[in-house]
Amino acid sequence: MAENREHTHRFKCWACMLDKTPETALKCDEEGMPLSLYEFSLWIQTMWSAWRKLNGLKWDAPLWDEDHQRFDTWLAQRVGFTTT
């Protein structure tokens, strides 16, 4: 039975950067562990750090809804992700 998963915009950007679909990016290793989720976690933290630095924000500065929207736009542009 196939699962119906809804992937986040950020996960789709990560898969795009890998030149994969979100489904293929979630393939498990031989032990059944989805290592891609760990890799995604490290990658998204790195992207947040880069974005904060570009915008002159400290690592612990509070982020608002508009910051998240700006980050998502920047992230998609950086990896070449489009929704069409």
Image: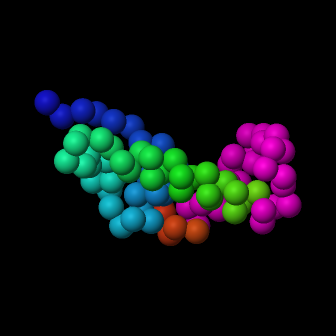
Work out which residue is located at the far left of the displayed protein and give it: 1
Q: Quadrant of residue 31?
A: top left
Residue 75 at what x, y percent from top left? Answer: 60, 60
> Left of 13 or right of it: where is 44?
right
Asked where in the image residue 5 lies, by quadrant, the reply is: top left
The residue depicted at 24 percent of the width and 33 percent of the height is: 3
Image quarter where the C terminus lies is bottom left
Q: Position of residue 59 (x, y in %)?
A: 79, 50
Quadrant including the N terminus: top left
Say which residue appears at 47% left-offset and 51% top-offset: 40
**What residue range appears in magenta?**
53-77
Q: Is residue 59 magenta?
A: yes
Residue drawn 84% across the image and 55% down it? 57
* Relative image position of residue 81 (x, y in whole percent): 48, 63
Q: Is residue 10 left or right of residue 57?
A: left
Q: Position of residue 51 (x, y in %)?
A: 71, 60
Tell me: residue 60, above or below residue 20.
Answer: above
User: Which residue is drawn at the image coordinates 78% and 40% (left, top)?
Assistant: 64
